Image (cartoon, grey):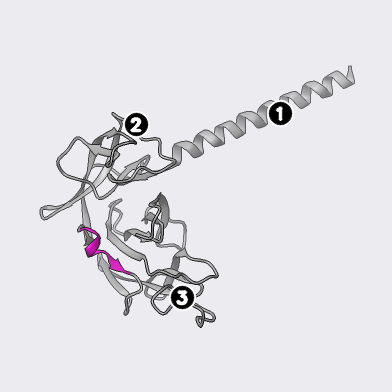
Amino acid sequence: MKTKNMLMSSVAVLSILVFVTSAQVRQSDQSRIELLEMGMYGPETTAQTGEVWLGLNISDQGSQILPYRLTVDKLAESPITVDLPLDPLFLLKGASMLSAGPVITIFGGGDETSWRPLLAKPPMELRLAGVVYSLEVTGSGDNSECSGEGLPHNARLVLKSGEKEQTIYSLGWYCGEDSSWFLIWAGDLDRDGHLDLYVSVGSEKRLLLSSPAGKGHFIKDVAQLYTGCGC
């Protein structure tokens, strides 16, 4: 009887662990934000025809988040198309902190020729809601083996304001042989009065928002899109 009771207790504990783990996985899936551009279809995306995603449109009349209904054809030259004539800079699914409506843009909106190279000196200055930020690439250690036109050893993308700073992306210990870190867009996407960024770092594009940032941080990396190239 004692052995039977111990077996039943073990089964009960195992069932609880399975339930908790499953709940955590479901919660993690639900909180994941997916990022797309119309010309790109990420390998892990779940986008399907008929779904409505939020997209950022920028024009001479201003910037706005719009709901876009998607058509997906993975074999087409442009795998993602939308139902509106106002093309989005990017598309998002699962971004519960965002909603349709006007937003502030302080930089960006053009094609790749208008992106700001982040190796440029001096650091890029950005102003939003009376706060001055700077965005720059820093490095450390011996750069003798690094290309003069590439990224420095231990390259970091750093956001600063006043005495506070935050590393928002890090290359690691090695040198970067290309200079393909760019600012694509900056503004206030989540309408909380703080800076949000959309950047290209090597083979990825990353969206960073201020509202989910933890204590002591400006911003949090919330979504990534693998581009497969340094662009």
Numbered range of the magenta stretch: 111-117
Residue 42, percent from left and from top: 39, 44
Q: Residues within 10 Å of mark 2 (few under 14, many from 20)?
A: some
Asked where in the image residue 53 lies, by quadrant, the reply is top left
Q: Decide whether residue 113 is among the magenta residues.
A: yes
Q: Decide whether residue 63 is among the magenta residues.
A: no
Asked where in the image residue 133 lies, by quadrant, the reply is bottom left
Looking at the image, residue 161 sits to the left or right of residue 109; the answer is right
Quadrant into which the C terminus falls? bottom left
Residue 3, percent from left and from top: 88, 21
- The answer to whether residue 156 is above or below residue 226 is below
Q: Earlier in the sequence, mark 2 or mark 3?
A: 2
Residue at the disc numbered 2? 48
Residue at the disc numbered 1? 14
Q: Residues within 10 Å of mark 3 (few under 14, many from 20)?
A: many
| Kind of residue at badge 2 | Gln
Q: Give the residue at x 33% y 45%.
A: 40
How many angstroms separate mark 2 from mark 3 (CA)?
Answer: 40 Å
Q: Residues within 10 Å of mark 1 (few under 14, many from 20)?
A: few
How many angstroms separate mark 3 from mark 1 (CA)?
Answer: 50 Å
Residue at the disc numbered 3? 152
Q: Earlier in the sequence, mark 1 or mark 2?
A: 1
Looking at the image, residue 98 sits to the left or right of residue 214; the answer is left
Q: Earlier in the sequence, mark 3 or mark 1?
A: 1
Q: Nearer the viewer, residue 46 or 41?
A: 41
Q: Nearer the viewer, mark 1 or mark 2?
A: 2
How many angstroms separate mark 1 from mark 2 (CA)?
Answer: 36 Å
| Kind of residue at badge 3 | Pro
Residue 216, percent from left and from top: 46, 63
Q: Give the residue at x 41% y 76%.
A: 163
